Image (cartoon, rainbow, N blue to C red):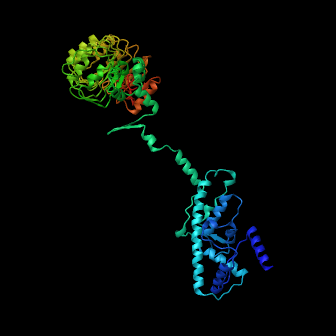
Amino acid sequence: MSSRKHRGSENMENLCPVTRKRSTNKNPVSVVGALVSTTKSSHYEHPSSPSALTFEALEEMGIGMLDSEESSSSALSAIALAVSATSDDNSNETTPCASVPRMVHQHTQRLSMGSTGDTTLEIPAVEDSLSMSRQSAEKLQILAHAKRSALGSEGSSNSNSPSKRLRNPLAAVTCNNQIDGTASLNFQPSTSRLAQVRQAKKPSTSQITTRIVATDNFFVFRTPVMSAHISSGINYFERLSDEILLDIFKWLPKKTLLRMATVCRRFNRCSRDETLWTRLDLGLRTIRPGALEQIVRRGVLVIRLAQASIQEPAFAPLTEGFRARLQYLDLSMASITRSSLLTLLSHCRQLKKISLENIELDDAICAEIAKNEALEAVNLTMASGLTANSVRLMMESLTNLSSLNISWTDLSADAVTALVTHISPNLIRLNIAGCRRVLFDSHVASLQKRCPQLLELDLSDCNSLTPTVITAIMKFKMLEYLSVSRCYLIPATKFIELKSMPSLTYLDIFGMLSDTAMEVLEKQLPKMGINKFIHSSVSRPTVGTRRTSIWGLRTRD
């Protein structure tokens, strides 16, 4: 009867596993006796073969705390936990950890509660029992390792199924920071398999290297489609007409065009087309020897060379005669020799506007300028080397001249006389400031007879003018702007007479009147703007802060 109850209690324990608590018995003799009695009176044996292990035996050793709902993989996981399960000294619950004495402790606890074995065993018998227990534990560890290998290969196939989305118990084998270095399990979580799949989908380096054609200095990366086009031997650029290439090249910067000229002969020929070199801005640049000739030969129409440094020789010594298409030339403040300037102007016959501000001139250069009969605006501010003969030649030849700035050029009296005598009647804007001792009232009277349609007149710093000049100025019926700044011989009362000129809109008299006299004059001339412009803009290519255009024309693409 007692044996039947004992087997029934074991069956109930297998069906309804409960948490096993540590025995509070601290007597080592009772523990050893219980262990020996377990080896003698247990109804199953630990065989030498690991394959003889049954689930009932595992249940006996304390595997009942794991649920067996998932599948065979959960049972295999329980085997691993059985190997690594131990009890925490600070808790009565079972704590997983890889420690062999946990199994021995469970045998001792269970048998000390349900059996009354002999406690007077000898020491050799105890040592034999302990060695047998260690051997059994080692065999269990080998079996668990084999089961873990099988679990890793089987569980990966359906890891995404709904029944497998619960946390794998093998992922929590290291709890409470207790890790046994001698028997670590080193299991990866279930997501590691997904990472392996993603890694397998990545292209291998061997596939990439097959697309690279390497050399000693560089490599070329081409897609298979590009390689097919190249291996076919078809040059698709040859199928494009010159018009299409020019339509593409016109969007490229000038530096890129120069690089395109080195690709092939056809690109070199197309990149030199004059339609691509309509305008060019080289202000503040250093032009290398011979570069100016190449620029002019490209057919440039608008070029800005303000404050540029042009190195010698600008043209080849035996340059053959050619006609440049240049129409708008700005050489203001540029560094250029007379010989280079003479050669440049000798190739220009279509100039419409030119600026030679602060440039050294001579009679030969002025003669080349005079050959451009289509000139409309000439800026010679602060230019040196002008003589009476050169001025007369230019004024007689430039019949279409409408704007002239010849201020501060240190003209002689004969040069001023030649200017006002032979100047074009079509002139509407004139700046002759700076003729301090050579411009007189008679010159202004001659100018009024020669150019009755004058709109702007700048006579600043002409100290030889007297009050009589106001009478000659009032004869300009269309004059809109007048500047007589620093003409100290003209009294302030004479300026009041200018209100009889209905066309006069602006009057500059800087340095002539005090503040009180200026207030009185403004009251006398309420409709006239006084001292509105400090600098003259007659024939100047750039006005104010604009540096990307000359005479209203863009110089940059």
* Residue at the extreme bottom of the image, as rendered: 120
Residue 483 location (% of width, % of height): 36, 23
Is 257 placed above or below 468 here? below
Q: Quadrant of the N terminus?
A: bottom right
Q: Residue at x 67, y 54 (%)?
A: 164
Q: Position of residue 404 (x, y in %)?
A: 32, 18
Q: Position of residue 186 (x, y in %)?
A: 55, 62
- The answer to whether residue 139 of the structure is visible from this angle is yes
Q: What residue occupies the far left of the structure in this picture?
A: 317
In the image, is 172 to the left or to the right of 296?
right
Q: Is residue 229 above or below residue 5?
A: above
* The C terminus lies in quadrant: top left
Rendered image quadrant of residue 540 = top left
Name the image quarter holding residue 368. top left
How many tags in the picture? 0
Residue 464 in picture, x, y percent from top left? 27, 22
Name the residue at 64% across, 82% down. 36
In this view of the protein, which residue sits in the foreground, 358 or 139? 139
* Whether residue 88 is visible: no
Vertical comparison of 443 with 137: above or below: above
Q: Is residue 101 left or right of residue 419?
A: right
